[in-house]
Image (tube, grey):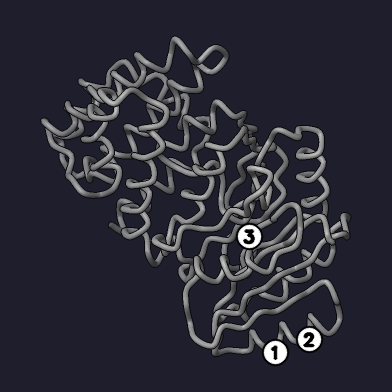
């Protein structure tokens, strides 16, 4: 049996598919199977996969008779997987050559860990670098993040196929988008997870990506999943105070004087709970919280278009302005992306 199952779902992926296949074939760790689910592609994807499978016996192609979507396709692949570990990749992304080796090494050295993601390089359709994330995250930080976002893009995921030691894990088919967020939240409930600093994947952002074309649906799913994760981590009264922020983060409410005040109050309650438990992560929590609140109010809630909302933010979140400046300086790419998302909303 192979140690690793590399898992990919693809629908009409001819534009970047050859690059992805080549990056997996170039791995320094070779004991893997590559399970690819072709979700009824109508372009040259089937022919590309047929040629690749003929050249590499580790590739197994499963073809759906009709288009069933990414989540169900991934579950079909998981049902056929034989590896102890699963490494996800998408048909428009690129693995660095040491990706499997480094993620497997971490899991072997930390047997209690149920999953590990990695740093990544964001690229555009032409392969040009847009930015990179190379900060490691420990289990405490990831559990904090899971109230709002997954710890890294889906194609960086590497996890135990049977995280409880007995039962294979599958994606929740209720989620056509954000299925990765849901999966990592459930993994984290079973054991510690981690994010490596090494950028092991080139993650492509382009207009055809699901995260762009279905952004609103994804925001609603993320709100549901994040609320569930927050309810695991925080007292219920704190979660209730966070509801105004959650609604704005999901694009459901607009920023005005009252909603900004309520969102800031929720953040204050969360910080009162988190900071005494943050140990070495106090500054990190402050920066992340400041960025979260600014994104929700100024970007997702449309606050930048309202002088009153901006004034309310500057007043009610005044204690977070210095950490916010630190967050922007440490990750200007994310701040710029939030502004771009505001323009598209």
Say whether marks 3 and 2 touch (CB < 8 Å): no
The Cα atoms of the two marked residues, 1 and 3, are separated by 27 Å
Q: Quadrant of the C terminus?
A: bottom left
Nearest-to-viewer mark from 1 and 3: 1
Question: Counting other residues with Cα less than 10 Å from the Cα at mark 1, is it few (<14), some (14-19), or many (20 or more)?
Answer: few
Identify the residue at image location x=69%, y=56%: 87
Disc nearer the start of the sequence (1/3) = 1
Disc 2 designates what residue?
Answer: 51
Disc 1 designates what residue?
Answer: 47
Q: Nearer the viewer, residue 273 or 339?
A: 273
Identify the residue at image location x=39%, y=61%: 174
Question: Counting other residues with Cα less than 10 Å from the Cα at mark 3, is it few (<14), some (14-19), or many (20 or more)?
Answer: few
Nearest-to-viewer mark from 3 and 2: 2
Disc nearer the start of the sequence (3/2) = 2
> Quick one: SS at disc 3?
loop
The Cα atoms of the two marked residues, 3 and 2, are separated by 28 Å
> Quick one: SS at disc 2?
helix
Instruction: State how many labels appear.
Output: 3
Q: Nearer the viewer, residue 273 or 122?
A: 273
Q: Is residue 190 above or below residue 71?
A: above
> Quick one: SS at disc 1?
helix
Say whether marks 2 and 1 touch (CB < 8 Å): yes
Query: x, y (%) of residue 65?
Result: 54, 88
């Amino acid at each position: 049996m192979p140690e690793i199952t590399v898992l990919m779902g693809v629908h009409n992926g001819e534009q970047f598919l050859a690059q992805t296949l080549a990056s997996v074939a170039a791995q320094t760790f070779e004991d893997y199977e590559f399970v690819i689910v072709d979700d009824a592609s109508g372009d040259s994807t089937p022919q590309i996969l047929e040629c690749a499978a003929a050249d590499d016996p580790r590739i197994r192609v499963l073809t759906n008779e009709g288009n069933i979507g990414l989540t169900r396709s991934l579950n079909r692949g998981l049902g056929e997987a034989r590896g102890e570990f699963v490494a996800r990749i998408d048909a428009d992304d690129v693995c660095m050559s040491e990706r499997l080796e480094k993620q497997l090494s971490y899991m072997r050295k930390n047997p209690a860990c149920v999953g590990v993601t990695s740093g990544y390089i964001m690229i555009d359709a032409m392969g040009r670098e847009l930015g990179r994330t190379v900060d490691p995250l420990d289990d405490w930080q990831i559990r904090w993040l899971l109230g709002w976002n997954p710890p890294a893009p889906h194609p960086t995921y590497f996890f135990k196929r049977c995280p409880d030691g007995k039962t294979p894990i599958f994606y929740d088919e209720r989620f056509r988008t954000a299925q990765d967020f849901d999966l990592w939240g459930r993994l984290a409930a079973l054991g510690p997870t981690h994010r490596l600093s090494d950028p092991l994947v080139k993650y492509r952002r382009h207009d055809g990506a699901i995260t762009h074309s279905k952004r609103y649906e994804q925001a609603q799913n993320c709100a549901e999943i994040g609320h569930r994760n927050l309810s695991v981590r925080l007292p219920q009264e704190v979660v209730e105070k966070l509801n105004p922020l959650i609604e704005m983060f999901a694009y459901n409410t607009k920023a005005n004087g009252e909603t900004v005040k309520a969102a800031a109050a929720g953040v204050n309650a969360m910080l009162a709970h988190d900071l005494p438990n943050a140990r070495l992560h106090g500054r990190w929590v402050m920066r992340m919280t400041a960025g979260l609140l600014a994104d929700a109010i100024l970007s997702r809630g449309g606050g930048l278009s309202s002088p009153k909302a901006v004034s309310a933010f500057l007043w009610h979140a005044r204690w977070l302005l210095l950490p916010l400046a630190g967050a922007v300086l440490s990750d200007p790419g994310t701040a710029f992306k939030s502004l771009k998302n505001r323009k598209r909303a």
